[in-house]
């Protein structure tokens, strides 16, 4: 009987290890299984709006965010998995002057673009020359 218990314990341990390994998460940490490579471009228009262009592969989704200096998300949009082109035009005229960031992320890689808003103040001439 003692000779039978040892092989049964070993067989049970191997079965348990194999079963638990088959139930293991193959995608730990919530990392996307497939990520999309992407290219971004940004410029300002003549009206003072921010134009954002994203070209990506159709293998995964991409998130676009506008974040202020405090880290608060002011704008967020997700470009779906099957979309390959996204063109956004943001009106920034309602935002106060300061530093902002545009973040584009596919879940693994994040591209950050800095945007600075400043209002030109009219200035009086510092020196006046008059001829009599």
Image (spheres, rainbow, N blue to C red):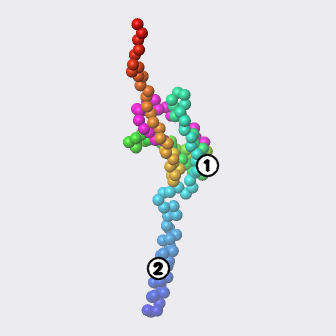
Mark 1 residue crowding within 10 angstroms, few (<14) / some (14–19) / many (20+): some
| Separation of marks 1 and 2 at Cα, in angstroms | 45 Å
Spot occupied by residue 87 in the image (x, y as percentages of width and height) = 57, 38
Q: Which residue appears at 50% of the width and 77% of the height?
A: 15
In terms of depth relative to the viewer, which is nearer, 2 or 28?
28
Q: Which residue appears at 47% of the width and 83% of the height?
A: 10
Spot occupied by residue 33 in the image (x, y as percentages of width and height) = 55, 57
Spot occupied by residue 117 in the image (x, y as percentages of width and height) = 44, 33
The residue labelled by disc 2 is 13
Mark 2 residue crowding within 10 angstroms, few (<14) / some (14–19) / many (20+): few
Quadrant in which the N terminus is drawn: bottom left
Q: Find numbered disc 2 in the image and state the secondary structure of the residue it sits on.
A: helix
Looking at the magenta stretch, what is its main secondary structure? strand
Is residue 99 found inside the magenta-colored segment of the image? Answer: yes
The answer to whether residue 6 is above or below residue 43 is below
In terms of depth relative to the viewer, which is nearer, 110 or 10?
110
In terms of depth relative to the viewer, which is nearer, 124 or 104?
124
The residue labelled by disc 1 is 57
Spot occupied by residue 61 in the image (x, y as percentages of width and height) = 55, 48
Task: Indicate which disc residue 84 carries.
Answer: none
Asked where in the image residue 74 lies, by quadrant, the reply is: top left
How many numbered discs? 2
- Span colored in magenta: 85-102
The answer to whether residue 35 is above or below residue 113 is below
Q: Which residue appears at 53% of the width and 33% of the height?
A: 44
């Amino acid at each position: 009987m003692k000779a039978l218990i040892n092989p049964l314990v070993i067989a049970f341990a191997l079965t348990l290890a194999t079963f638990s390994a088959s139930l293991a998460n193959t995608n730990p940490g919530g990392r996307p299984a497939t990520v999309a490579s992407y290219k971004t471009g940004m410029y300002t228009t003549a009206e003072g709006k921010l134009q954002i262009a994203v070209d990506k592969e159709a293998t995964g989704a991409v998130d676009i965010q506008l974040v202020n200096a405090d880290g608060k998300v002011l704008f967020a949009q997700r470009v779906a998995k099957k979309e390959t082109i996204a063109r956004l035009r943001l009106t920034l005229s309602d935002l106060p002057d300061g530093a902002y960031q545009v973040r584009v992320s596919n879940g693994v890689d994040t591209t950050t673009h800095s945007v600075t808003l400043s209002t030109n103040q009219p200035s009086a001439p510092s020196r006046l020359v008059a001829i009599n």
